[in-house]
Amino acid sequence: MDNEILIRLFIFFFAFATLALLERLVPRRSQEANKGPRWRTNWSFIIVDSFFLRLLAVAIPLLAIGAAIDAKTNSIGIFNLFDWPIGIEFILSILILDFAIWLQHVVTHKIPFLWRVHQVHHSDPEFDVSTAIRFHPIEIILSMLFKVGLVYLLGPSVIAVLVFEILLNASSMFNHANIKISSKFEKILRLFIVTPDMHRIHHSSDSNEHDTNYGFALSIWDKLFGTYKVEPNLSHEEMEVGLTWQNDKPTKFWWSIWLPFRNK
């Protein structure tokens, strides 16, 4: 798709910069961990992740967008079996893809090996917009393979997949942002989308809390499947984020990259 990468990069950097600025202007919580090492490590992750995705694209030329183009061209997938109105297909695609990512997230918490990989994300000692780009390359590769398979199964339109990829990235940055939103507006937002206050509970060091609020974009799935938690046991300012054994080692990139293989 023409200019797909440029469009996604522009939206990514614009969203990240805007949320980072809001974190400075209206922070939700004070942060104790040294921001410099944390952000260097978290940015290192997205650089390494991007490199491995490029390698994956060499081995499997059709990633999510390419898979959507191929599926449409060759009439592969459920949506291509029917003459759907484009608007209905678009809405269904977004809903199904978002539910699939919610389900994938739940599974990463339930299967031991996947949790060992996913805990790299949760081991960030603070919770801000940079946490949204802190994912181990193994998780990124597995997630992309899952999305490619799902795209071939569904056969959604190319524009639906592109919009969903942008929505997923932008909403992930938003719901990890350390920004204060007025309680009235936040309550309205969480009727539809995952807010930072909702997702912060998921990053609690309390295992009973981080097994809730799995959503990335839409808030409906946690409410439907009984994993929704309105407020943390402590206040948002007092609650601890990270893991039960939390220390400052996750601020170091190489320590973090080997975390799935450590006895933690």
Image (spheres, rainbow, N blue to C red):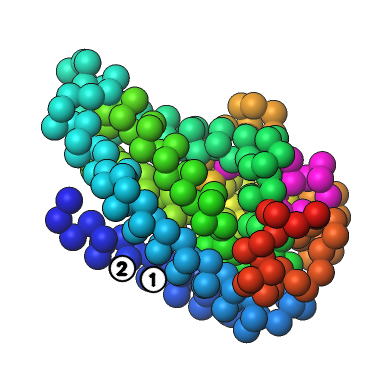
Q: In the image, which residues are magenta?
A: 202-215
**Residue at image location 15% in from the left, 56% down from the top:** 2
Location of mark 1 (residue):
13
Amino acid, disc 1: Phe
Between marks 2 and 1, how big is the CA–CA gap? 5 Å
Q: Is residue 211 magenta?
A: yes
In the rendered image, the quadrant that contains the C terminus is bottom right
Q: Quadrant of residue 134?
A: bottom right
**Residue at image location 25% in from the left, 37% down from the top:** 68
Instruction: Please say if 158 is above or below 29.
Output: above
- Tell me residue 57's x, y (percent): 31, 51
**Residue at image location 74% in from the left, 46% down from the top:** 210
Q: Is residue 211 left or right of residue 146?
A: right
Name the secondary structure under disc 2.
Answer: helix
Q: Label 2: how many residues lie within 10 Å, few (<14), some (14-19) or many (20+)?
A: few
> Could you tell me if residue 263 is visible in this image?
yes
Location of mark 2 (residue):
10
Instruction: Please say if 119 is above or below 41.
Output: above
